Image: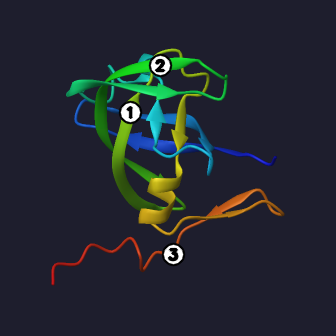
Amino acid sequence: MSVIRLPLFFIGTKGEKNLCTLFDSGANLSCINPDYVENLETPIHLGRVRRVSTASEGHYIEINYRVILDFYIDDVLLSDEFLVVPGLSEEAIIGAATMQKWRIKLNFERDTVEVDPKVAKMQLI
């Protein structure tokens, strides 16, 4: 299995930081390690605890919080919700829902991530 890890610039209401980010089409949602949340954004309680499965059979993680963060890919500003996942081995993960939303394409031959700047333009119609 191929993976792509890139440093991405994240921005929240409390600060900004470069995080080594894994692009994972096998992850449904985007996630962030709790160690990096405090200086970026105030977490929002989910209301109900989410119990999600991991790659280890029979192993679940309880998730209580989320944050909404802006981030840049190739100077294109994007934004999405990130689940705050205790014990996450990565600094941040961009999951399939975020990739679909912004039409992010993974190029494993070049180890690059491509985003069409036209897709990222905000429009009110």
**Horizontal side, residue 23 vs residue 65: left or right:** right
Residue drawn at (39%, 60%) of the image: 77
Which amino acid, by three-letter code, is at mark 3? Asp
Residue denoted by label 2: 61
Q: Give x and y (percent) for residue 69.
A: 33, 43
Marks 1, 2: nearer the viewer:
2
SS of the residue under disc 3: loop
**Horizontal side, residue 108 vs residue 92: left or right:** right
**Horizontal side, residue 49 vs residue 27: left or right:** left
Q: Earlier in the sequence, mark 3 or mark 2?
A: 2
Residue drawn at (56%, 43%) of the image: 27
Residue denoted by label 1: 83
Q: Earlier in the sequence, mark 1 or mark 3?
A: 1
Give the Cα distance between marks 1 and 2. Answer: 11 Å
Report the residue that reaches farthest toward the bottom.
125
Q: Residues within 10 Å of mark 1 (few under 14, many from 20)?
A: many
SS of the residue under disc 1: strand
Which amino acid, by three-letter code, is at mark 1? Leu
Q: Are marks 3 and 2 in contact (CB under 8 Å)?
A: no
Marks 1, 3: nearer the viewer:
1
64 vs 9: above or below: above
Q: Nearer the viewer, residue 121 or 28?
A: 28
Q: Give x and y (percent) for residue 120.
A: 38, 70
Residue denoted by label 3: 116
Residue drawn at (60%, 19%) of the image: 58
